[in-house]
Structure formats: C-alpha cells, structure tokens
C-alpha cells in the first residue's frame, strides 16, 4: 500500500463528521475561564463574561449537531444562573474549611483542594447538562477528572455544603442523588449494580441523605440503595442495600501482627 492509498484508507474510515477534537480543547479553555471569572479577584467579570459568551457561541457551532435544538438560547439562561452556582460553591468551600483541620484558610480551599475544584466544575457543568446542551458538560467534568482524579458525572444531583476530602479515586454516577451536608473521602464509589444500555433512563446509582459521612474506599451501589440521614459509612464498606437513618456501618478486617522476640 503506497502513501496515497494509506491516506485514502484513513480518510475513508474517518466516518464521523461531527468528531472534532477542537471541541474538547475549547471546552477546557471555556472551563478554565469560567472558573477564574467566578473566583479570581484579578479576572474582571464584565470582560470575561463577554469573552465567555463568544467562546460559548463556538461551542454551539461545534457541539450542536441537531440544528432544531435551540442551543444558541442556552447562554442567556445559563449566565443568569452563575450567581446561584457561585453561592453554592462558596458554601462548599466553607464546609470543606470547617470540616478539615488541615485547612488554614478559605483561600487554600479555593486554590489547593482538588475536591473543591471537582465540585466547582461539576456544578458549572450540571446546569448545562440539565438544559440538554450536548457533550460539553461531560467534557467539562472529564477535564476536572483528569486534573483531580475525581469522576463526577454532570447528571448527578448534589445538594448544598458538599465536602470531598483528598479526592483521588472518587466516582459519582449519573443518577446519584446526594442531599445536603454530605462528606465523602478518597476512593468512594457511588455506582450501579450492573451496566446495561437499556438502563439509560433508569435510576442506577444510590441516594445519600442529609449529613451522611462516607469514609475512604467505601462502595455503595444500586439505584434503590438509600443511605439514611446522619449515618456514617466506614472505610472499605461494600453496600448494595439501604441503610436506615442514624446508622453506623463498618467493615472489620482480620489483622494479625506477629512479632519475633529478640534472642539473648
């Protein structure tokens, strides 16, 4: 096969005209600018909102393959939600600062906590997801995933004052519901019992009620699984059934320590 044949073969197999990776890069740039517009004191809000609107117009051109969808009308509705999103994120930051004795300031939370960054990008992506804007919300949360190790699907429903500590390895599925004042630690999975394409419109992921704490590497699976309010789920627990309110669930591994006596 000569060079021209190779080129023709590759071009023939590039059969998805909507697959333009420029959309991924532009979504990441949009995400960065949006985050700085909300939090960075040196980033002017007025000028950046104008630039964000221009960036969003490009995302519309790249992401809205179904021309009958009113994608161009989403921005006006979305930008009106930014003050409310910022209010929620400020509550998240305060919850992290209040719960973590290692936190020395709110500024540290905003700039150095991967859990906060992941929550921030989730909240910014969730409203676009809710409006039906295609693909971009997922690209936004995957961008946060690549930077933090936290995988939050933009379809998840998360309440106020949410706290993720240490962050790495956290997975929160599309239909998970998390109420207010919930704390989770690294390695926690809120997942589905099993995966099948015909379950796309089914609640597959658990519900976590108010004031629940879930410690490291706990796995909670299933759309019918509800963790009752004020419960504590210990590290490494594996749950596929509901837990009543005010419960404590813990995993008890068997640990044996053998110490050899010194001779002499």
Image (cartoon, rainbow, N blue to C red):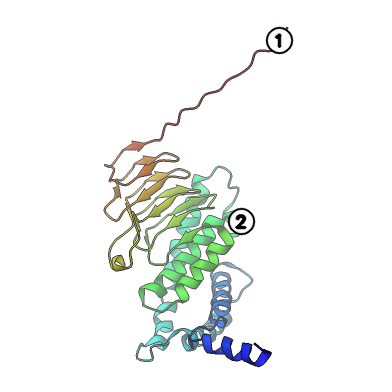
Image coordinates of residue 132 in percent, x first then y, are 36, 78
Q: Residue at x 43, y 64 (%)?
A: 153
Q: Is residue 111 left or right of residue 224?
A: right
N-term mark: 1 or 2: 2
In the picture as drawn, the residue positioned furthest to the front comes out as 1
Residue that badge 2 annotates: 112
Q: Is residue 250 left or right of residue 216?
A: left
Where's the C terminus, which quadrant?
top right
Q: Is residue 38 left or right of residue 195?
A: right
Where's the N terminus, which quadrant?
bottom right
Vertical side of 246 occupied by 28: above or below: below
Q: Is residue 24 left or right of residue 224?
A: right
**Disc 1 versus disc 2: distance between alpha carbons?**
50 Å
Q: Residue at x 45, y 73 (%)?
A: 137
Secondary structure category for the residue under label 1? loop
Vertical side of 212 occupied by 111: above or below: below
Q: Residue at x 36, y 37 (%)?
A: 249
Residue that badge 1 annotates: 263
Image coordinates of residue 14 in percent, x first then y, are 53, 86
Depth check, front residue: 215 or 117: 215
Image coordinates of residue 23 in percent, x first then y, are 53, 81
Vertical side of 255 occupied by 123: above or below: below
Image coordinates of residue 90 in percent, x first then y, are 48, 60
In the picture as drawn, the residue positioned furthest to the top comes out as 264
**Mark 2 surroundings: few (<14), some (14-19) or many (≥20) residues within 10 A:** few
């Amino acid at each position: 096969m000569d060079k021209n044949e190779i080129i023709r073969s590759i071009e023939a197999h590039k059969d998805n005209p909507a697959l333009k990776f420029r959309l991924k890069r532009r979504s990441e740039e949009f995400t960065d600018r949006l985050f700085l517009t909300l939090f960075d004191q040196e980033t002017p809000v007025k000028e950046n909102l104008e630039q964000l609107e221009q960036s969003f117009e490009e995302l519309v051109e790249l992401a809205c393959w179904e021309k009958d969808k009113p994608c161009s009308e989403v921005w006006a509705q979305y930008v009106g939600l930014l003050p409310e999103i910022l209010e929620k994120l400020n509550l998240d930051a305060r919850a992290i600062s209040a719960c973590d004795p290692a936190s020395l300031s709110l500024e540290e939370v905003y700039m150095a906590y991967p859990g906060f960054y992941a929550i921030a990008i989730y909240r910014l992506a969730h409203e676009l997801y809710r409006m039906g804007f295609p693909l971009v919300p997922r690209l936004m949360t995957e961008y946060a995933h690549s930077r933090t190790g936290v995988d939050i699907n933009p379809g998840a429903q998360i309440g106020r004052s949410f706290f993720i500590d240490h962050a790495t390895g956290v997975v929160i599925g599309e239909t998970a519901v998390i109420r207010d004042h919930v704390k989770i630690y690294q390695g926690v999975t809120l997942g589905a019992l099993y995966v099948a394409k015909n379950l796309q419109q089914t609640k597959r992921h658990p519900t976590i009620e108010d004031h629940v704490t879930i410690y490291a590497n706990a796995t909670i699976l299933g759309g019918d699984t509800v963790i009752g309010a004020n419960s504590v789920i210990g590290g490494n627990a594996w749950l596929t059934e509901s837990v009543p309110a005010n419960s404590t669930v813990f995993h008890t591994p068997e640990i044996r320590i053998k110490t050899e006596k010194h001779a002499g």
